[in-house]
């Protein structure tokens, strides 16, 4: 009896030390080829994130800095739009609060939402795409204090003051080069003052960005719903994320820095013809003086 107990104890010790399963031990004793050790169930859980856009840590690290910066920029703009829409302001406040849940962006958190993951990744050099990525990260300089102040303002439900200067600084800090995204910024910073046609240009263009580059984004559903409920989605619009020809999506030649009307014209040219007619005619409606009027005012 004692011999049997001792033998069982020895076998158990060997199985524990070598991490053999009962099946593998029986195969060893029977002279058969030992089967592979099965992977621990749910071992992947340690890599899962709360973020819908970045479900795993590998997804975060596989995103290059340029795309991450553009994503953060568009989400900051989307939050501002939401905060200025009565039905969406509570959702904007809740989302901004969750971005600030940890108080800063110094540490990568699995519990962070999309925007928190993007900001902490850019600050902590988490994306990994080689030398080119390192060069891009070197051009990005997040101003934590201003970003946190902006998010806290939205969280509190108060109106954001100095939106134009904040977004212009954010654009520079994130090294935003895409002229379409800069045109979106020029319009979004004046969101409460925009007319329906200008808002349609913004929502159409932002929806194109999300559908093409960030379909799983947590804020995309709000921008999409805003477009649907308020009729702000242009039909049959060219997707400016997919240029039809070289240079067709380059708006720097026609965008005028700081002018909302020029931003509207630039976006209109980017998305091309739609159900409302030619983008040029849209611009004429937005600016009674036409492009000449804008040029004349700039010369003064």
Image (cartoon, grey):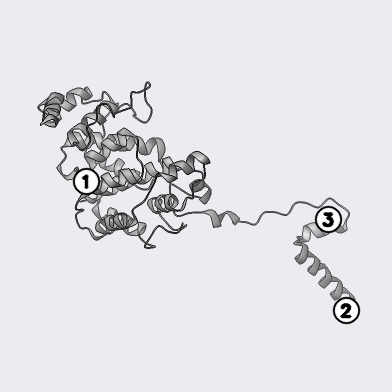
Residue located 42% across and 40% down the image: 66
- Residue 54 got which mark? none
Could you say whether the residue bearing mark 2 is in a helix, strand or loop? helix
Residue 1: image quadrant is: bottom right
**Disc 2 designates what residue?**
2
**Disc 3 designates what residue?**
27
- Of all residues shown, which one is farthest toward the front? 300
Q: Is residue 68 above or below residue 244?
A: below
The percent position of residue 45, horizontal first and vertical second, equals: 55, 56
- Residue 164 got which mark? 1
Q: Is residue 281 visible?
A: yes
- Of all residues shown, which one is farthest toward the bottom? 2
- Residues at discs 2 and 3 in contact (Cβ within 8 Å): no
Q: Within 10 angstroms of label 1, few (less than 14), some, or many (20 or more) residues?
A: some
Q: Is residue 1 visible?
A: no
The percent position of residue 143, horizontal first and vertical second, equals: 33, 53
Could you say whether the residue bearing mark 3 is in a helix, strand or loop? helix
**Quarter of the figure with the C terminus:** top left
């Amino acid at each position: 009896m004692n011999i049997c107990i001792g033998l069982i104890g020895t076998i158990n010790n060997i199985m524990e030390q070598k991490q053999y399963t009962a099946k593998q031990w029986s195969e060893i004793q029977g002279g058969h080829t030992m089967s592979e050790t099965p992977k621990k169930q749910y071992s992947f859980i340690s890599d899962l994130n709360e973020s819908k856009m970045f479900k795993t840590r590998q997804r975060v690290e596989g995103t290059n800095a340029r795309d991450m910066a553009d994503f953060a920029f568009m989400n900051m703009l989307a939050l501002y739009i939401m905060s200025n829409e009565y039905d969406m302001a509570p959702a904007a406040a809740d989302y901004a609060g969750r971005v600030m849940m940890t108080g800063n962006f110094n540490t990568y958190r699995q519990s962070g939402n999309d925007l928190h993951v993007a900001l902490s990744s850019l600050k902590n050099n988490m994306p990994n795409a080689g030398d080119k990525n390192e060069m891009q990260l070197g051009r990005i300089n997040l101003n934590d204090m201003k970003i946190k102040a902006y998010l806290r303002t939205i969280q509190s439900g108060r109106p954001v003051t100095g939106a134009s200067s904040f977004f212009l600084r954010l654009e520079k800090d994130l090294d935003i080069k895409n002229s379409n995204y800069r045109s979106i910024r020029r319009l979004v910073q004046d969101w409460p003052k925009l007319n329906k046609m200008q808002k349609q240009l913004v929502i159409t263009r932002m929806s194109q960005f999300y559908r093409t580059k960030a379909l799983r984004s947590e804020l995309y559903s709000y921008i999409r719903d805003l477009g649907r409920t308020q009729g702000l989605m242009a039909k049959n619009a060219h997707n400016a994320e997919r240029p039809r020809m070289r240079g067709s999506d380059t708006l720097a030649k026609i965008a005028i820095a700081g002018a909302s009307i020029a931003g509207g014209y630039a976006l209109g040219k980017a998305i091309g013809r739609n159900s409302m007619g030619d983008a040029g005619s849209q611009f004429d409606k937005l600016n009674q003086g036409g492009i000449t009027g804008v040029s004349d005012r700039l010369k003064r």
